[in-house]
Amino acid sequence: MDEMSFQQVYQTHNDAIYQYIFYLIQHRELAEDLTQETFYRAYKQFNTFREEADVKTWIKRIARNLVYDHFRRKQIVKFIPFVNTDDRVEKETPSDILERGAAVANLYEALKELKLPYREALVLRKIDELSVKEAADFLECSEKQVTNNTARALKALQKIYEERGYTYVTEL
């Protein structure tokens, strides 16, 4: 693939990769930095991409490895979010954020409470809308594990919502 096609890949997948990283780490500036690093690494390795997998999956795997490397470097055993409540901004216009309102803020706050494997399964299945098989392939685990982690994440999310008095959105 040539440089022009990489530019198309970047334009097509940049927002989705940013969202994926942001949902995992809940920190806007760090998500932006890791997104840049993801595409830098993808660009450096682009000539080795064999197109055996979907390019979005390939880039998302690079992003996932960078997120995990970041936490390993910080020696964080249990995921501890380091975002303050004013940093819940994603790449949306102000009117978009107002429209989605408190529901989005509540979701971000609740997601921070989930264990990373639960959060990751939930993001892949319910937000990125991957199938169980696609999520299992991406996470390199069994479909059963993805199903269990998603169910446990939803149950934990519902409990968090109940504890905080949030309105639980069943269609997540």
Image: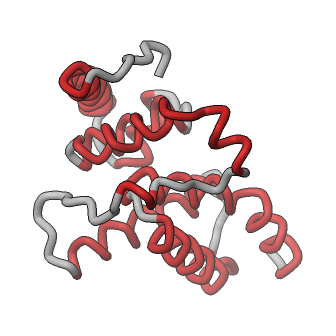
User: Residue 154 appears at what percent x and percent y?
Assistant: 30, 24
Quadrant housing the N terminus: bottom right
Q: From the viewer's perspective, is residue 118 above or below residue 116?
A: above
Which residue is located at x 35 percent, y 38 percent?
121
Instruction: Point out residue 14 in the picture as x, y percentages from the top left corner.
Output: 68, 62
Q: Is residue 158 above or below residue 53?
A: above
Which residue of the protein is positioned furthest toward the left in this rendering?
Answer: 77
| In front of the other: 69 or 30 | 30
Quadrant of the image occupied by residue 36: bottom right
Q: In screen coordinates, is 14 left or right of 32?
A: right
Q: Which residue is drawn at 55% across and 31% down?
A: 129
Q: Is residue 127 left or right of residue 136?
A: right
Query: In this picture, is 91 found above or below 121?
Result: below
Residue 45 rendering spot, x and y as whole percentages = 60, 81
* Residue drawn at 67 percent across, 77 percent down: 46
Q: Can residue 144 be seen in this view?
A: no
Colour theme: secondary structure
Q: Which residue lies furthest to the right in this view?
A: 4
Q: In which quarter of the image is residue 12?
A: bottom right
Q: Residue at x 25, y 71 (%)?
A: 71
- In the image, 144 versus 51, the foreground residue is 144
> Looking at the image, which residue sits at the far top?
170
Q: Quadrant of residue 111?
A: top left
**How many marks on residues?**
0
Q: Is residue 14 visible?
A: yes
Nearer to us in this view, 29 or 24: 29
Seen from this angle, which residue lies furthest bottom?
A: 44
